[in-house]
Image (spheres, rainbow, N blue to C red):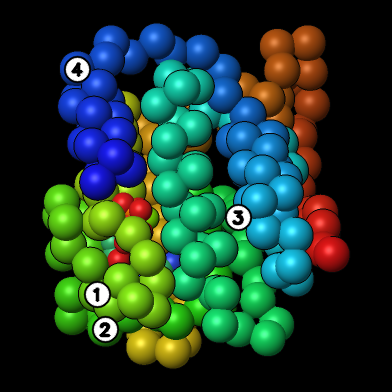
Amino acid sequence: MALLIDDLLTLARISRAEIQRQDVDLSALVASTVADLRRNDPDRKVEVIVAPDLHVPGDPRLLRTVIENLLGNAWKFTSKRENARIEFGRFKDQDGSSAFFVRDNGAGFDPEYASRLFGIFQRLHAATEFPGTGIGLASALRVIQRHGGRIWAEGAVQQGATFYFTMPEANLAAEKRAAPASAAKSVAAPPSEFAEVTQSN
Ligand SMILES: Nc1ncnc2c1ncn2[C@@H]1O[C@H](COP(=O)(O)OP(=O)(O)OP(=O)(O)O)[C@@H](O)[C@H]1O
Ligand SMILES: [Mg+2]
């Protein structure tokens, strides 16, 4: 009950909080969240792949709640997998738009209900199998919407899940870093965002 009230208070805080935009290193946020998950659950062996140096302009405190919720879910819903694997990266569409993603090879879900997952108290798994209150994704949705972005999910039963989110200024920030003012004339190679950093126990 105390946890439920905490989660509801977080949701209320997220809805009211003023957005303080600054450069946020999402890759570092993911890495520190994974370190916390490993500390709290040292017996789990999970392969985690984090694309390095993915930055966005956003509110660090609010974006931390998104990353913690998405990674926390990936960690939880892979708990029955022998070879659990979680990946964070950036997906680029052919039209140049991009989305960040958190992918896992866990329990997955029925795709028919993919949009419902973001509703408050909406859960597709029994609490006895995977505990939770059903507020995490509702909070993540609110944070991303408040940044002007979108969040959605893809998955299939027993075939893992991928959560995507966009941040409207993320493309701009990536371009700025790939071609800083001093090197503006040189043709910069595309950032090697999918260079992988593997951490595993
Ligand atoms: N990575 C995932 N794999 C499979 N199902 C997921 C995943 N993430 C979320 N879901 C489904 O979406 C539901 C809602 O997720 P949400 O994070 O809001 O709640 P929760 O994790 O159950 O509880 P809470 O985050 O409040 O502790 C989950 O109960 C589960 O059914
Ligand atoms: Mg959750």
> Mark 2 is on which residue type?
Asp
Residue 155, picture quadrant:
bottom left
Q: Residue at x 18, y 75 (%)?
A: 113
CB at disc 1 and ligand 1 closer than 8 Å: yes
Q: In this view of the protein, can residue 50 be seen by the observer?
A: no
Residue 59, picture quadrant:
top left
> Mark 3 is on which residue type?
Phe
Q: Which of marks 3 and 2 is in front?
A: 2
Near-viewer residue (102 or 33): 33
Disc 3 is placed on an element classified as strand
User: Which residue appears farthest toward the front when viewing the image?
Assistant: 1
Near-viewer residue (127 or 173): 127
Residue carrying label 3:
88
Residue 7, picture quadrant:
top left
The disc, 1 or 3, on the residue closer to the chain's N-terminal end is: 3
x and y percent of residue 138 in the render? 23, 47
Residue carrying label 4:
16
> Mark 4 is on which residue type?
Arg
Q: Residue at x 52, y 28 (%)?
A: 56
